[in-house]
Image (cartoon, coloured by chain):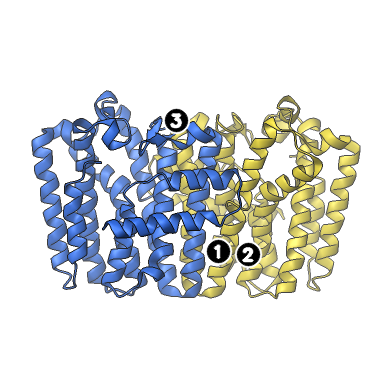
Chain colours: A yellow, B blue
């Protein structure tokens, strides 16, 4: 999948290079280009391919997904939220551009994502507009943002296991679901196919989040590119906190198997998505 | 225009009443329902009417405009930005819900605006999608957000008159332009009509902003519902600071006349828009 990640890195640079050279462009570009796995864009390209959509056709959607993800990280890192100085091994937006510009850079990326979705998809027909709508529902008050509000709440009100699951399902799962399903909506996939993809994405988000919790206690800042041990310090309820590292690893493995089972029911050539899914279990950052 | 303002107040309450009763809904609802002039929604309904669009058809667009405006106010009021405790006579979002939830409530309102625009317009055809795209360009990195970044910059780098004009044109003018022009785009207005509406909206934004500067020195917190005298305290370049109150009044009047001139060239029944335009010059808050 490294070639798709590299492709997205290039596309991101190209996109932002053509914008006016000013403060807001600099701040948007900075956070968009300091790396990361590009998981959501890669998922977007891979599921699009399953349904016969070319990379060229899907690159703007993949870009929009990464813009939404990046805006959420910029706001999440703010002093009023997680107060993180580092992200992906680099200073966070507010450490470089100041808090006010970081807030605006996040706003601008969210807004830009919708400009791209409208310009490249919605104005060209209903399937593109439906895909954009699917994404907006996943990223909004009943999706990712709800997860962030829950996460904040649980900083002072310890979560039960069910609450933890729901919180992750929204905070991490919703945007992964958007990346996986929106290309299928755009391609006119059948309702039962979307359902299987949602099952896949839900489990992938879960596996991904458990792995995050594990890395927070087993990795180092150098490898992870962000602070570690934060969950324990902030008394956050995590999989590791509730079940320990070994049992958490088993749960991540189970979720991964549920991913593969959902893919197998799709009756399409899902080899690349399977590979990606398995590789996420081996990740160290 | 009071009946349109009241209609919007009711529509806003109805919209948010049907959302799940949770923290993010509460924070979104709070800022959306603490009043204000509803200028952008009213403009949206009035220009839509000019081009034969019914109120019913345009209410979701008007709602989306107010959501974008409100999100920008929530973020603008944050301690890292203008640090305002009061807005429209009530405590600002972060004073009631805390900074983190205020940031997320702003994000959620911006996201929700696009959900509404996609769901009620873009999925139903190209004109609706083009209207949504027009709005997203006005609210984004080259529109309102650019104006906010400039405004921040000028807190420490005094603006020249040209810079001040451009800053207002983006910060205030862009969203007013969206409210005025997007309904016309939706209705399939001709390019020259959109141009006249842009001329109208640009001058309206200007008149509105000069009036704001004047009220900041001539009004009281009780009447205005927010802190006064802030501009002088923060050394901000304003029309009043550059030209004094009397000359500023003349300039606002000139801009208003330019508004009316643009409307008259439209060759449609613009009586209500004219009334609204004139009434804004008499406003005390």
- Pointer 2 with pointer 1, Cβ within 8 A: yes
Give the distance between the C-alpha atoms of the residues marked 3 and 2, in whole angstroms: 35 Å
Which labelled disc corresponds to residue B17? Answer: none
**Residue at label 2?**
A182
Label 3: which secondary element: loop
Label 2: which secondary element: helix
Q: State left or right for residue A88 relative to residue A264.
A: left
The residue drawn where x is 13% and y is 39% is B248
Label 1: which secondary element: helix
Same-chain status of marks 1 and 3: no
Q: Where is residue B8 in the image (x, y as percent from the top left)?
A: 38, 57
Earlier residue among tags 2 and 1: 1
Which labelled disc corresponds to residue A132? Answer: 1
- Report the quarter where the C terminus of chain A lies: top right
Same-chain status of marks 2 and 1: yes
In this orientation, which residue lies closer to the viewer: A7 or A63? A63
- Judging from the image, mark 3 belongs to the subunit labelled B
Q: Is residue A15 visible?
A: no
**Residue at label 3?**
B80
How dense is the environment of label 2, judged by Cα within 10 Å: few (below 14), some, or many (20 and up)? many
């Amino acid at each position: 999948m490294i070639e798709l990640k590299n492709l997205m890195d290039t596309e991101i640079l190209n996109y932002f290079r053509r914008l006016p050279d000013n403060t807001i462009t600099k701040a948007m570009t900075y956070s968009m280009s300091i790396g990361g796995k590009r998981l959501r864009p890669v998922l977007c390209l891979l599921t699009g391919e399953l349904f016969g959509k070319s990379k060229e056709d899907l690159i703007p959607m993949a870009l929009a997904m990464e813009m939404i993800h990046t805006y959420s990280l910029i706001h999440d890192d703010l002093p009023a939220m997680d107060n993180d100085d580092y992200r992906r091994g680099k200073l966070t937006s507010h450490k470089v551009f100041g808090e006010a510009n970081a807030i605006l850079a996040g706003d601008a990326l969210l807004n830009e994502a919708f400009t791209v979705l409208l310009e490249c998809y919605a104005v060209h027909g209903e399937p593109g507009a439906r895909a954009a709508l699917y994404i907006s529902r996943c990223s909004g008050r009943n999706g990712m943002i709800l997860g962030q509000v829950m996460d904040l709440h649980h900083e002072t009100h310890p979560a039960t296991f069910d609450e933890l699951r729901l919180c992750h399902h929204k905070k991490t799962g919703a945007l992964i679901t958007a990346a996986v399903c929106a290309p299928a909506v755009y391609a006119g996939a059948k309702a039962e196919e979307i359902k299987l993809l949602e099952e896949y994405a839900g489990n992938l988000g879960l596996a991904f989040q458990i792995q995050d919790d594990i890395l927070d206690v087993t990795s180092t800042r150098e490898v992870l590119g962000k602070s570690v041990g934060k969950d324990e310090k902030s008394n956050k309820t995590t999989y590791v906190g509730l079940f320990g590292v070994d049992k958490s690893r088993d749960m991540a493995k189970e979720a991964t198997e549920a991913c593969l089972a959902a893919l197998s029911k799709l009756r399409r050539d899902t080899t690349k998505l399977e590979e990606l899914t398995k590789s996420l279990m081996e990740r160290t950052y």
